[in-house]
């Protein structure tokens, strides 16, 4: 048996049950409480990562729901590809488990399922079974178990207040034997899950099923209904208050930005009720929107039905009504507009206001002179240079985006599955794939297998399939129908009347799928949709969200909507994580993190299969997120929203990240010039100063320099005052960091050889320091008299302070954040910046007794054989690391590294930074302080291609904080 493993577990036991200060627990082996603390730390994430790393597993859980089980679908599928099997033991206790759950379980190929019934094996009288345990075995020879209060239900693994204990042991340990024997005993008293058993259970379930109403359906996303009266929900109350404030301040226009399904129509009705107009006009671009909107207004405002009417191509009923609901196509015709006076309506509402750039919309917008005009849209960002914000005088009354709406439980949660598209003879579906391959028998069968496997919420399938071509839509609809899935294709060639009829057929359950291209992106509500299938390239994050949004309206018996995204070899795959997270930073690191960490919004979950992830990684690596056109489109969105030229801090708040501007343009005026803006004029010297602050300080990694410069803009700052400023900001303070700040701001830290990216900052210090305190240098004071430079200089400081909010100011580094080698040199207070090639995998700074360690976990096969060290995690707390090549234990370098370890007082403070591969660029993720484990040094030899051997030393580094489960899996998966 592995002696190191035994030692690790022994220390862990002593740490857990005897003395946590005297003995060191080894991360993943430690007993721990597993609870739902946050979106990043919950039972679901822990179970998911245990599954991803185990060699086999057994779940013994009384209660299972569709939503609880479906969150692990991609993991089960990936495990099946690796040949890893598991078991699930569940029950019919209290008739909680629905028949559909058993059907879902039966559809997972690599899991054996049994039903606990006790000795008599009779489902008619299910015996009490209330277990909640999850057991995992690992190839490394140990087992873990999570036992406590969490069933396999969405609430229990994501949000409920739950307590579970995770324990670890070796195969022959008493706790392992006890759990194993208990499981096997219960397993023997259970019966296999079969189709015949499910059929029988369905009959019994109908007789005995509990009469429960899912908690998710207690809230209508549009509004609350109290004693038959419609009242505003949380979002609508806030928006109504802001609309009232807007009008009280004298404003005549307002814009509501609200995600699809969050109740914009009811919100408009509530505000019209508050306003009490003499006459009201509702304008939409689709006739089928009008009737539903009219019905919503009647529910809220009430009154006689004769007060409401539609004015469209098919109806002139609304011509003289108090509340008029009109299509823009009909209303915009000059002869129709002429039937209304310009002041006929004192309140006008434009639905889908982003369409107001079109000529007919403009004609209507400019004709009328209401007392108040409201625009509503979910997608104000445009790529056609139209500025919807300007039309509404930049007055945004309220804004709630998709991710916020999901967190607030205003929408139906989604379960997103990014799965790989079908491969034919080793060729992956891509942008140029021929129609015959897209609609081949093999691919259609594959699509059906995936849609069946990932399923849908509810008893009846109501599906929507988006594909790339009209011919594909028609062929797929026919082929799916032949295989028992009644499907109808709809394209832009179909009339509105036919579209409406087909939608009704889907709602009535007469068909299973509508197969379309892009006609259902917006302007239509089909609340019953419980499965959205994406069989096309993601051309736009806006369109992606519009299509995903077709299933986000809450509906009876729909706990969540299943989104199945078939990911081919598309160049635009990088847009998928950007769309799902609403990320506008244009940062590759941010896009990768979105894929790696699979964020959760409320109870909405994002999952990718391993192959789908790899295709997205490839797209991110190959894409250029900082192309001028992409940045220009994003810049214009912000400019349009603000109604002025944005500053860098404006972009940082919710758009392009500072790191993009710093790396590509060095300073903000250069970026503005690239965006065709000529607002500011700078001399080359001012550009040098601005480049220094932007590249070195505006990343916000350390507040100290930024706070000092910000204070010095108002005059001299004494050392005592500076210390007080740092304390108020929660910053760590010691002599070393104060000296480092001096070296940075006087540029003493930099020399010609170490300047990054060939940026020259000149030789002019930004500050001076004397017995009184700190002052801005005379040259900088002179330059700040220029208003253009002053605006951009202050903006760079504000941007840095804004970015600094992402970091813990009380520590040198924040665990989980990314740092480059050059940044680490500054934050560790080095006297000089050390060129990257001199740092290598680690660098000993003798003056401060520090040693940063940089590990590329999966090394490229193309790098020199002298640095292809096989560093690897032994577990979440221990990294097995190799020294630089040609090193011996008795050598000076290794002795310096190990000094003081045997005495329990390491001489060097070590910090570990890791990145998965060189594809991630030059930044490393900070994992925390670490130290060499006593007695772990081992002399080894690495073989070269010429057959000779070089001495090399291996060692174990123990992290003070174990790597969190998601990050650990992300770094270690191959």
Image: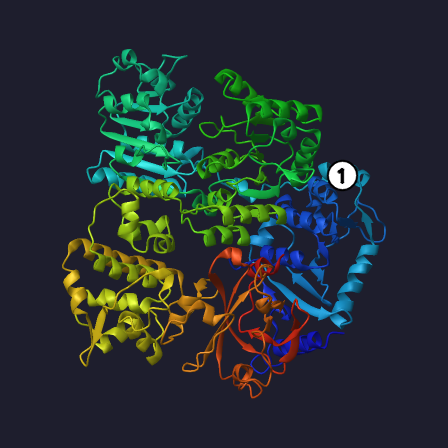
Q: Secondary structure at mark 1?
A: helix
- Asked if residue 262 is positioned above or below residue 866 in the image, the reply reads above
Task: Name the residue located 31 percent from the left edge and 17 percent from the top edge.
Answer: 332
The quarter of the displayed image where residue 699 is located:
bottom left
Residue 257, horizontal then vertical, whole percent: 36, 38
The quarter of the displayed image where residue 364 is located:
top left
Residue 310, horizontal then vertical, whole percent: 38, 17
Q: Is residue 754 visible?
A: yes
**Color style of the picture:** rainbow
As drawn, which residue projects farthest toward the front? 946
Residue 135 in the figure: left or right of residue 507:
right
Residue 647, horizontal then vertical, whole percent: 27, 50
Q: Is residue 327 visible?
A: no
Closer-to-camera residue (902/748): 748
Task: Name the residue located 82 percent from the left edge and 60 percent from the top edge.
Answer: 185
Q: What is the quadrant of the C terminus in the image?
A: bottom right
- Asked if residue 391 is positioned above or below residue 78 in the image, the reply reads above
- Asked if residue 485 is positioned above or below residue 668 in the image, the reply reads above
**Numbered marks: total:** 1
Residue 237, horizontal then vertical, whole percent: 36, 41
The residue under label 1 is 204
Residue 338 in the figure: left or right of residue 26:
left
Task: Name the residue located 40 percent from the left edge and 49 percent from the top edge.
Answer: 585
As drawn, which residue projects farthest toward the bottom? 903
The quarter of the displayed image where residue 863 is located:
bottom right
Q: What is the quadrant of the N terminus in the image?
A: bottom right
């Amino acid at each position: 048996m592995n002696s190191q493993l035994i030692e690790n577990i022994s220390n862990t036991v002593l740490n857990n049950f005897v003395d946590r200060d005297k003995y060191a627990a080894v991360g993943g082996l430690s007993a721990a409480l597993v609870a739902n603390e946050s979106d990043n730390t919950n039972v679901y994430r822990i179970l998911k990562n245990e599954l991803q790393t185990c060699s086999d597993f057994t779940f013994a859980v009384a209660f299972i729901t569709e939503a609880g089980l479906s969150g692990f679908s991609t993991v089960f599928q990936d495990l099946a590809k690796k040949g890893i099997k598991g078991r699930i033991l569940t029950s019919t206790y209290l008739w909680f488990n629905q028949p559909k759950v058993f059907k879902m379980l039966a559809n997972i190929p690599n899991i054996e399922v049994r039903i606990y019934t006790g000795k008599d094996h009779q489902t008619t009288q299910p015996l009490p079974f209330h277990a909640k345990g999850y057991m995992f075995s690992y190839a490394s020879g140990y087992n873990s178990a999570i036992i406590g209060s969490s069933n396999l239900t969405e609430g229990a693994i994501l949000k409920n207040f739950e307590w579970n204990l995770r324990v670890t042991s070796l195969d022959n340990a008493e706790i392992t034997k006890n759990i194993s024997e208990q499981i096997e005993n219960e397993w023997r008293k259970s019966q296999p899950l079969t189709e015949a058993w499910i059929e029988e259970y369905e009959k019994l379930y109908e007789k005995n099923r509990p009469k429960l109403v899912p908690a998710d359906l207690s809230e209508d996303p549009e509004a609350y209904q109290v004693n038959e009266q419609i009242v505003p929900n949380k979002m609508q109350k806030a928006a109504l208050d802001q609309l009232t404030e807007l009008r009280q301040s004298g404003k005549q226009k307002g814009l509501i930005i609200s995600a699809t399904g969050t109740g914009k129509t009811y919100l408009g009705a509530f505000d019209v009720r508050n306003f009490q107009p003499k006459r009201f006009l509702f304008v939409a671009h689709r006739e089928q929107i009008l009737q539903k909107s009219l019905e919503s207004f009647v529910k809220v405002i009430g009154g006689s039905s004769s007060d409401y009417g539609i004015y469209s191509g098919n109806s002139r009923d609304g011509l003289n009504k108090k509340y008029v609901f009109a299509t823009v196509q009909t209303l915009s015709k000059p002869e129709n507009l002429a039937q209304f006076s310009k002041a006929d309506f004192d309140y006008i509402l434009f639905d889908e206001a982003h369409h107001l750039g079109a000529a007919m919309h403009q004609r209507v917008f400019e004709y009328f002179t209401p007392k108040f005009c409201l625009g509503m849209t979910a997608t104000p960002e445009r790529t056609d240079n139209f500025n919807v914000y300007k039309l509404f005088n930049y007055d945004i009354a309220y804004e709630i985006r998709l991710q916020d709406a999901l967190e607030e439980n205003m929408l139906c949660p989604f379960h997103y599955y990014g799965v790989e598209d079908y491969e034919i003879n080793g060729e992956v579906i891509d942008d140029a794939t021929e129609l015959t391959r897209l609609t081949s028998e093999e691919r259609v069968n594959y699509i059906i297998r995936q849609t069946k496997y990932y399923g849908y919420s509810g008893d009846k399938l109501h599906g929507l399939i988006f594909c790339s071509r009209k011919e594909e839509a028609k062929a797929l609809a026919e082929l799916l129908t032949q295989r028992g899935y009644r499907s109808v294709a709809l394209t832009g060639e179909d009339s509105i009347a036919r579209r409406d009829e087909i939608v009704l057929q889907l709602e009535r359950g007469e068909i299973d799928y509508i197969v379309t291209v892009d006609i259902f992106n917006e302007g239509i509500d089909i609340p019953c949709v419980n499965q959205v299938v994406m069989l096309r390239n993601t051309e736009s994050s806006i369109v992606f969200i519009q299509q995903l949004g077709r299933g986000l309206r809450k509906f009876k018996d729909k706990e969540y909507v299943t989104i199945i995204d078939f990911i081919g070899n598309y160049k635009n795959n990088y847009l998928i994580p950007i769309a799902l997270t609403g990320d506008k930073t244009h940062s590759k690191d941010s896009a990768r993190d979105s894929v790696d960490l699979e964020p959760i919004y409320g109870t909405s979950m994002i999952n990718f299969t391993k192959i789908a992830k790899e295709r997205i990684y490839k797209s991110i690596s190959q894409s250029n997120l900082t192309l001028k056109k992409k940045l220009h489109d994003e810049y214009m969105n912000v400019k349009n929203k603000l109604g002025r030229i944005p500053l860098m801090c404006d972009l940082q708040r919710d758009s392009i990240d500072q790191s993009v501007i710093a790396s590509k343009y060095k300073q903000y005026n250069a970026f503005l010039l690239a965006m065709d803006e000529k607002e500011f004029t700078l001399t080359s010297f001012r550009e040098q100063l601005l480049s220094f602050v932007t590249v070195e300080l505006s990343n916000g990694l350390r507040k100290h320099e930024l706070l000092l410069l910000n204070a010095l803009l108002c005059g001299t700052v004494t050392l005592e005052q500076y210390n007080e400023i740092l304390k108020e900001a929660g910053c760590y303070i010691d002599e070393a960091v104060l000296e480092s700040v001096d070296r940075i701001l006087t540029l003493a830290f930099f020399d010609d050889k170490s300047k990054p990216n060939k940026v020259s900052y000149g030789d002019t210090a930004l500050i001076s320091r004397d017995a009184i305190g700190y002052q801005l240098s005379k040259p900088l004071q002179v330059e700040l008299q220029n208003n253009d430079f002053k605006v951009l200089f202050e903006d760079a400081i504000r941007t840095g302070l804004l970015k600094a909010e992402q970091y813990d100011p009380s520590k040198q580094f924040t665990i989980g954040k990314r740092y480059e080698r050059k940044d680490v040199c500054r934050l560790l207070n080095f006297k000089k910046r050390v060129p990257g090639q001199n740092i290598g995998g680690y660098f000993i700074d003798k003056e401060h007794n520090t040693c940063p360690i940089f590990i590329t976990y999966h090394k490229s096969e193309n790098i020199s054989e002298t640095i292809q060290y096989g560093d690897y995690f032994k577990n979440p707390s221990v990294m097995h690391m190799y020294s630089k090549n040609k090193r011996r234990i008795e050598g000076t370098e290794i002795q310096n590294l190990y000094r003081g370890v045997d005495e329990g007082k390491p001489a060097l403070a070590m910090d570990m930074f890791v990145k998965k591969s060189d594809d991630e660029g030059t930044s490393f993720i900070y994992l925390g302080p670490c130290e060499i484990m006593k007695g772990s040094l081992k002399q080894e030899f690495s073989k070269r291609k010429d057959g000779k051997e070089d001495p090399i030393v291996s060692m174990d580094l123990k992290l003070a904080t174990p790597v969190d489960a998601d990050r650990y899996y992300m770094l270690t998966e191959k």
